[in-house]
Image (spheres, helix red, strand yellow):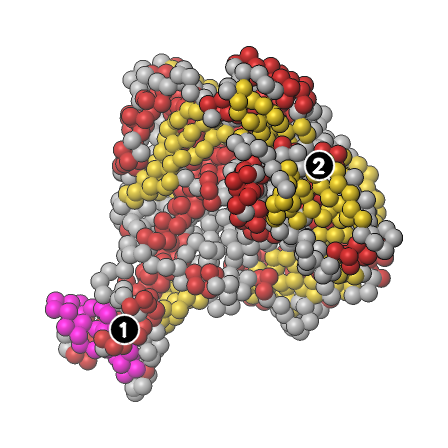
């Protein structure tokens, strides 16, 4: 027995001995990734495969007069050149179903897809693109979201009209999208209490306008897909999607076939961060080309394309009005935002779901009003991105927490503690905080970051002669930590089989996008079954094999898929212990699984070797295998039409203290240290969670300081890593993270989701730190040297709220 | 664009022959040419010539008070050189701010000069060091060379006086006097892997509170990296007090013509040249 374990345990240690929970466990995919063995979609090539390229618009807003593809079609090596005219059966895609994969009569942004080529090589496909002639009739360009609301603004989505006066979006078939009389794509409004009464009862009211900029995900693995039809017309997609089961259905609808005939395989995905939640035109286009050519078609973006034609974080203009009593109790909050939707509607337009939660429920506020209008422009369109609106909302809310505290002469920590949520609270929005570590997060981050002492000391240095100032700032966040019930189900299925050698295959619907889910899921199963991690194989990337899951988003996978995996493991354990009980006579309740054996719970005495026991079940008269399934649906509810309801089974909390150095001669802000305290429910894989939090902090740092997708008049000016500045290794600050373990009752082993949390507070905390260093408050991101220098030297343009009602 | 021929000559002679037959796109590290041609900003000639295998076009040697640096010398090799670190330290500082380790391993000094970016990292220190460039060609079956000051070589963004049949073969730098003080400053959004919003080079000899042989150069504030003659004149031989620093900064302000682009506005560039030159002069005073 001991020998058996030694062979199967990694690194000579024995994780099966004692609990795996909270241990530092290397990610299962790390050796492959570190040694270059991982086969991403780029590395997959199917026999007979063609390569596809997309021709995008050279106009921001124009009518398409004509498209001439004759020369491209004649180029040797070209198998197909398609335009909207070749796929009259195409259907609108996206969150609001407001655009066609291949544009028909009109382009609305520079990423708009006009034609596509499938050829023997990428180079030939590229050359063919150069031979396609498009005549445009330019239309007035609208790139300012404020101007989009003007009565005489150009209409981005007028009711579709063909030359014959009929609908041209999708001739002859039902049109999901029928145009907009104005440029307003979406309005979301939320209210609780009585804001006027709240304001009347306020001793202090502050108001600011904030501007949040464009950033993009910068996944190292760019967007890509391979589409292939078998002779019966069944579709196989190799796809980087984060939502395979939802897409299976969408692609089936697109092709008007049974969803059962669509199979999606996800090769290892080089980062998602929310960018792969929607269907984008390149995916249907690859499918069209595969259907038309009868060959597998591969379409992988270049890096430049990834910058130009994948989604952005939602840019937002936000007005916040907040009040409190003279004792420092929050009275009301009123938010109005203008979201620049870009040319089409993707998930970015729905970020108010999350923003209003932060506004209403991060701290206790009796009266709130929230309103977002998302407007169409000729800009790139925004999708979902780690944090989903929460970076934007937290930036504004936490600036006001500092401003109110300062005006009252209360320190920022005390002011936050006074208004912080407690466990058990049900907020007016209906969120029930069964566990809530916010106050512990606040106190821990403040104490470990030496916040109060530094905050006072830095302030005292405002007027000394030193041009280099130090500042410290804090911000907290609330985010869903137990899934988010957006779809009919927020669940995940698991199939678990234990073979004759006690090797477990964990088949889960949950997608791995680098976040480390397969390791955590394996760990949770091993914890139940008393096995070492090496005894588990995780299968998680093929919709023909894996059970349903809603997708990887909303920080949900550890919580939802974890509970699902535990459920399946417990069923297997019950079956095994029942069998053992029937063989040894002890009650099943008196037995347990540990170290690859059935043991007596009381003494730990080994009764059976697990593999032998399972074989005895298999090779018997009543031959049976140990295979179980489990579907976990969290006990959360859909929000009602007023956006009220307990949408998540648990909520995650964090406070981050950021320390900065500001060179007032250059405006350079150096992030020196981040001290974070995160309520994660419970640490499952300590190594994994540390990596996830550090990575999130660095992503938040980029949002705060360096990253800026420069969109000017509809043009992306920096579609490359030279000019789009990610944080590089020398700038990464000292990071100190504490875990607040609130042991959530519903969470797997007490854990909550944490994927998005670490990126959310950084920009807000850095803004507060810059104020603490210099006495100057910045309300526009990012804090690049020039923006900070202008603000410090009175040369910044003040932000105004000039949005029409 | 189709590359008809790729060649990698072993000798300068052979390379110059190929150039004479032109048109040719020569490259060494390729760290500028590759992204520029990919982005469509540079059109590659039908012949692509890799210079890296030419013998005798690398290396750093000191002779008669002149340091000769082969055009193929990489940034990493410059940083590893004792004579660069000790006697041409301002160049060493610029290499230390140059892109990333990977690019420093590939990028060459000759390439950085011929790329003639107004923000080219090595150009500012080379101007401070009064560097000369050596150009070679083979017009009549015989290698001919000419030498000229770097300031005359640079014409504008991406433009130099190099004729299509010429190769930049070496850089020559007169060794500064012992005790020569050099300082390089580069401003970007992040400390590594960035292109200068501005850069400043300052070189001088300390003499009893005064600066002598003052040389000041700026990057990314004019069509080429430039020397600031008026600022130098304000400083030359004068006691480095606050009035003189003010005068030098004011003079510098008249010598630059910064533009607004992705990296910074013209206004901010001007502010930074003034603020940072002031800081560098104050640092030089206390040095």
Q: Residue A6 has which mark?
A: 1
Q: Position of residue A50 (x, y in %)?
A: 70, 65
Magenta highlight range: A589-617
Front one among A204 and A719:
A719
Q: Alpha-carbon neighbours of circle 1 within 10 Å: few (<14), some, or many (≥20)?
A: few
Q: Is residue A203 above or below residue A444?
A: above
Q: Residue B150 has which mark?
A: 2
Q: Position of residue A237 (x, y in %)?
A: 59, 63
Identify the element where label 2 is drawn: helix
**Disc 1: host chain:** A
Residue at the spot x=62%, y=63% of the render?
A226
**Disc 2: host chain:** B
Front one among A798 and B63:
B63
Q: Is residue A397 visible?
A: no
Q: Is residue B50 above or below residue A99?
A: below
Residue at the spot x=46%, y=60% of the render?
A34
Front one among A205 and A36:
A36
Residue at the spot x=50%, y=19% of the render?
B209
Front one among A567 and A696:
A696
Please state if A621 lies on the left or on the right of A252 as rendered: left
Picture quadrant where residue A604 is located: bottom left
Identify the element where label 1 is drawn: helix
Whole-Å distance between the Cαs marked 1 and 2?
Answer: 68 Å
């Amino acid at each position: 027995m001991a020998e058996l374990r030694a062979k199967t345990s990694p690194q000579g240690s024995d994780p099966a001995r004692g609990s795996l929970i909270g241990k530092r466990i290397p990610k299962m995919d790390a050796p492959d990734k570190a040694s270059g063995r991982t086969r991403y979609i780029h590395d997959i090539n199917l026999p007979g495969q063609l390569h596809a390229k997309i021709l995008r618009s050279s106009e921001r807003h124009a009518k398409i007069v004509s498209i001439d593809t004759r020369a491209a079609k004649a180029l040797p090596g070209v198998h197909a050149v398609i335009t909207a005219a070749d796929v009259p059966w195409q259907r609108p895609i996206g969150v609001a179903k407001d655009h066609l994969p291949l544009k028909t009569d009109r382009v609305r942004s520079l990423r708009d897809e006009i034609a596509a080529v499938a050829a023997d090589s990428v180079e030939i496909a590229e050359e063919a693109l150069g031979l396609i002639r498009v005549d445009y009739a330019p239309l007035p360009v609208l790139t300012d979201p404020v101007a989009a609301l003007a009565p005489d603004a150009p209409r981005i989505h007028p009711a579709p009209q063909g030359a014959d006066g009929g609908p041209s979006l999708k001739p002859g078939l039902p049109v999901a999208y029928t145009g907009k009389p104005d440029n307003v794509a979406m309005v979301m409004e939320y209210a609780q209490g009585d804001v006027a009464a709240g304001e009347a009862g306020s001793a202090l009211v502050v108001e600011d306008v904030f501007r949040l900029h464009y950033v993009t995900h910068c996944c190292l693995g760019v967007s890509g897909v391979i589409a292939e039809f078998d002779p019966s017309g069944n579709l196989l997609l190799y796809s980087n999607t984060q939502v395979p089961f939802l897409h299976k259905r969408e692609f089936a609808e697109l092709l008007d076939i049974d969803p059962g005939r669509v199979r999606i395989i996800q090769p290892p995905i080089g980062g998602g961060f929310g960018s792969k939640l929607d269907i984008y035109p390149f995916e249907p286009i690859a499918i069209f080309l595969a259907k038309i050519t009868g060959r597998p078609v591969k379409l992988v973006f270049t890096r430049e394309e990834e910058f130009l034609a994948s989604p952005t974080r939602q840019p937002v203009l936000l007005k916040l009005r907040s009040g409190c009593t003279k004792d420092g109790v929050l009275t009301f909050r009123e938010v109005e935002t203008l979201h620049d939707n870009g040319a089409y509607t993707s998930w970015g337009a729905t970020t108010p779901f999350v923003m209003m939660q932060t506004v209403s429920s991060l701290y206790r506020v009796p009266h709130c009003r929230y309103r977002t209008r998302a407007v169409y422009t000729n800009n790139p369109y925004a999708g979902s991105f780690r944090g989903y609106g929460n970076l934007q909302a937290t930036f504004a809310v936490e600036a006001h927490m500092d401003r109110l505290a300062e005006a009252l002469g209360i320190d920022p920590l005390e002011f936050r503690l006074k208004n912080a949520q407690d466990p058990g609270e049900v907020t007016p929005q209906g969120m029930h905080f069964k566990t809530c570590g916010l106050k512990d997060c606040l106190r821990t981050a403040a104490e470990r970051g030496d916040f109060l002492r530094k905050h006072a000391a830095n302030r005292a240095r405002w007027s000394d002669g030193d041009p280099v100032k130090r500042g410290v700032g804090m911000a907290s966040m609330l985010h869903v930590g137990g899934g988010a019930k957006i779809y009919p189900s927020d669940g995940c299925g698991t199939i678990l089989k234990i073979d004759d050698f006690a090797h477990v295959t964990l088949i889960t619907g949950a997608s791995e996008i680098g976040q480390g889910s397969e390791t955590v899921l394996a760990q949770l199963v091993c914890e139940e079954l008393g096995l070492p991690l090496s005894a588990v194989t995780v299968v998680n990337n093929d919709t023909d094999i894996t059970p349903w899951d809603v997708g990887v988003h909303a920080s949900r996978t550890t919580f939802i898929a974890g509970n699902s995996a535990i459920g399946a493991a417990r069923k297997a354990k019950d079956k095994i212990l029942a069998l053992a009980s029937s063989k040894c006579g002890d009650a099943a309740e008196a037995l347990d699984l540990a170290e690859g054996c059935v043991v007596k719970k009381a003494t730990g005495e080994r009764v059976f070797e697990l593999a032998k026991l399972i074989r005895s079940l298999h090779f018997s008269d009543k031959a049976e295998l140990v295979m179980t399934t489990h579907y976990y649906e969290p006990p959360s509810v859909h929000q009602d039409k007023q956006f009220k309801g307990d949408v998540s089974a648990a909520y995650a909390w964090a406070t981050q203290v950021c320390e900065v150095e500001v060179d007032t001669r250059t405006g350079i802000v150096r992030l020196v240290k981040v001290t974070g305290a995160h309520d994660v429910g419970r640490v499952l894989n300590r190594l994994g969670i540390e990596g996830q939090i550090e990575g999130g902090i660095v992503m938040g740092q980029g949002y705060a300081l360096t990253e800026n997708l420069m969109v000017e008049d509809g043009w992306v000016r920096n579609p490359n890593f030279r000019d789009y500045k990610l944080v590089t290794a020398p700038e990464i600050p000292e990071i100190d993270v504490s875990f607040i373990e609130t042991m959530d009752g519903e969470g797997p082993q007490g854990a909550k989701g944490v994927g998005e949390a670490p990126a959310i507070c950084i920009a807000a905390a850095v803004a507060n730190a810059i104020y603490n260093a210099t006495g100057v408050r910045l309300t526009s991101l990012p804090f690049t040297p020039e923006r900070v220098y202008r603000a410090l030297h009175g040369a910044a343009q003040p932000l105004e709220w000039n949005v029409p009602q | 664009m189709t590359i008809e021929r790729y060649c990698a000559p072993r000798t300068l002679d052979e390379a110059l022959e190929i150039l004479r037959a032109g048109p040719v796109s020569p490259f060494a590290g390729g760290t500028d040419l590759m992204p520029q041609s990919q982005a469509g900003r540079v059109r590659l000639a039908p012949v692509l010539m890799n210079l890296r295998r030419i013998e005798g076009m690398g290396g750093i040697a000191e002779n008669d008070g002149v340091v000769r640096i082969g055009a193929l010398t990489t940034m990493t090799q410059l940083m590893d050189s004792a004579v660069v670190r000790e006697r041409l330290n301002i160049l060493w500082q610029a290499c230390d701010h140059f892109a990333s380790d990977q690019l420093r391993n590939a990028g060459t000094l000759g390439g950085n000069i011929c790329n003639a970016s107004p923000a080219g990292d090595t150009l500012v220190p080379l101007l401070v060091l009064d560097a000369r460039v050596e150009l070679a060609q083979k017009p009549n079956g015989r290698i001919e060379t000419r030498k000229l000051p770097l300031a005359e070589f640079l014409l504008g963004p991406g433009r130099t006086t190099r004729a299509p049949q010429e190769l930049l073969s070496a850089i020559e730098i007169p060794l500064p006097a012992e005790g020569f003080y050099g300082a390089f400053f580069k401003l970007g959004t992040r400390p590594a892997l960035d292109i200068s919003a501005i850069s400043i080079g300052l070189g001088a000899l300390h003499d009893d509170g005064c600066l002598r042989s003052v040389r000041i150069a700026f990057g990314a504030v004019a069509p080429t990296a430039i020397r600031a003659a008026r600022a130098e004149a304000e400083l030359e031989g004068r006691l480095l007090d606050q009035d003189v620093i003010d005068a030098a900064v004011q003079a510098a302000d008249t010598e630059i013509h910064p533009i607004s682009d992705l990296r910074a506005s013209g206004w901010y560039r001007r502010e930074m040249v003034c603020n940072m030159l002031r800081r560098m002069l104050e640092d030089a005073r206390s040095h």
